[in-house]
Amino acid sequence: MSDNHPDAIKDSIVAQAATLFDVHDNVARVIRDLTLPLNELQDEYNITSSKTFDFEGMLRLYLYKEVAGMDQSEVTDKVKKWPYLRMYFGLDRAPTQQALSYTERKRFSYDLRQLIRDVARGIRSAAKERDIYYSDLRDPVQRPAPDVVEESQTPIHHYVDNHAPDIISTALDDVCPVLDTGRRHNTVHEDQKVWEHQLTMSLADRAGTRSAFRTFNKFRGNALHHDTHLRAVKKLATPSSYQYTFDDFGVNRNPISDWRRIADTVNPQFSDAVDNLLETIRPAETFTEPLAAAIDMIRVPYSTTPYKGESDVESGDRRVVVNEETGKTRVPKDDYPAMVNGKEGEYAYEYATLTIVGRNAPIVLAVEPVRHHSNWEGASGESVPWAEIVDRLMEQATELVDIHLVMADRAFENAEVAHVLDQYYDVDYLMPKKKNSKEVKQEVEVVRYDPTLKSRVVPYQLYLDEDSTRYVDAENDETVGENAYSHDVNFMYVPAERDDWIHKRSNDVKYTVFTTNRDDVAAVDAPGFVDRYSDRWDIEIEYKMIKPMLPSIASRDYRMRYFSFVFSCLLYNLWRLVDHSLKVLVTEAYDDYGRSMFDDRLDPLLPMADLLASSLILFMCGDGLDPPD
């Protein structure tokens, strides 16, 4: 070590770790992202060769050992079992216990070893201050000595480490063969290589840093060229029975949009992969049908503006109004991606999903593109109704599972969607009403002055005909068009739990309004039924997990864009499946682990990043994964 005060070095590293714990809940990722003052930490061994372990990598590994409270045999076994740790720490291979011991004695001075231990204590303290308690921060004094641990007493995190790779490998076998690019079998890079490349792209952004991506590439032999990957994915998303021509992409020439053909080609492969995954879950007692599902929409930002710069505008260019208040106009680009939706300053690709929620493992069952007419498109724009999107989602999902309740986001709340769910699929639905609904305005004042109840259920009848779509009070004899009746609806006025749900404040109570086709909901039961909508937050967590796995790609080809989102959904499903399978195994092996029928879903046993890294290793090593037929 240099003459710099060790306390200053320790404080600097611990402060970094404390900040990183606000981003990561895993000590390995925190240590991976630390910036170590290498110029202040001296390697006592000045002879290097191809067999010498990287000094910085061994520093991080030794720090990880001390923070996690492991002994040498435990940490070397874990690094050998989980290759992602080697990549986190920048090691080209797993060190043996002897190599770690030699490094500690010969390459780390006494002062350096003491500094690392002090830093480790500071990092452990920072984690506990943030209530971060997990397996690799356990108290070492509570750990049995390795030579007296019996199989039944093995810590749960060790049990997970030992069984996860086999489960991941089996799950990959279920998913990957279903995805078929349709290329020749004697191609240089088989489909397995394509999925390896796609997974690497997802890992690059998911890790929060590209260091893991660069580390992966150091060990990749015969890596797939990016252009080859693009061609393979485009081929997967192109219907084999349809030959595209230039006319297909002309205005008003192709009766079926190219984006629709892409989705219709990719979605069956996604459904087959999900079906294979569900076959693994169905036998478990914790999976029950019929189940509850949630429908929502995710926006993936697109940074490029659809408008020309004023210097590029030519005489005769069509102008559109972009601000109604100021009358500001701009000139749209001719070649802007059709599937980007939005308004000025907010552009994004949008996708709708249907996901299992509640006590079952939250699996994405169906995906659909969202296509809405945007201002810059003029008369040529195309818009797909929410009812058609919901119909397609339900068609995909009901082929896989039995659904009894659908909870949709407020954006999907309209009479046509309600009609599709009730009449086409005979399921119960629960949706928050839009704040500007005229029916809400009519009844909310009644709730204010209800002397007995804080909640109210008002029956309506839904009518659909060529000229009107409306809710009519069930006690009203108004005649709406012949044969236009759809179904009975209940509006539930209940106290709001979220500020963005509020329709009206009354007597210090904030009210929200939900709609359902359930006919057995009384006023006293309405708040309890509406509480089920909180299960839908699974889909919000899902989006937070999926978004970081979407690779940053420059291609505007919708085949690449849509497949990348679908593939990220499959990775999310893969994580949920592996975690579910691990929970089943751990429940059987440990009497004190599990849940009763009244308990919430258990917390994940396997971090998402660990699944991605381990999956990529299995791809690269070829263990347990056969190429598609």
Image (tube, grey):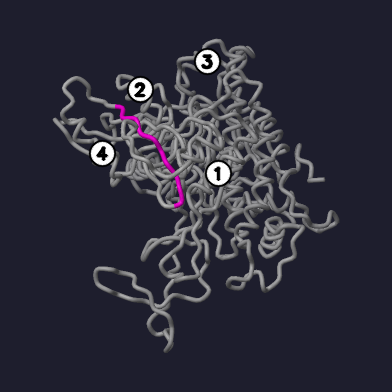
Q: Amino acid at mark 1?
A: Asp
Q: Going from the N terminus, do you reach mark 4 or mark 2 first?
A: 4
Disc 3 target residue: 593
Q: CA distance from mark 4 to mark 3?
A: 40 Å
Quick check: 399 above or below 369?
A: above
Viewer-nearest of labels 4 and 3? 4
Cβ atoms at labels 4 and 2 below 8 Å apart: no
Disc 2 target residue: 528
Residue 217 belongs to magenta span: no
Viewer-nearest of labels 3 and 1? 1
SS assignment at label 1: helix
Q: Going from the N terminus, do you reach mark 2 or mark 3 first?
A: 2
Quick check: 306 above or below 71?
A: below
Q: Amino acid at mark 2?
A: Gly
Q: CA distance from mark 4 to mark 2?
A: 18 Å
Q: CA distance from mark 1 to mark 4?
A: 29 Å
Disc 1 target residue: 391
Q: Amino acid at mark 3?
A: Tyr
Q: Nearer the viewer, residue 266 or 252?
A: 252
Q: Nearer the viewer, residue 52 or 469?
A: 469
- Name the quadrant of the C terminus: top right
Viewer-nearest of labels 1 and 4? 1
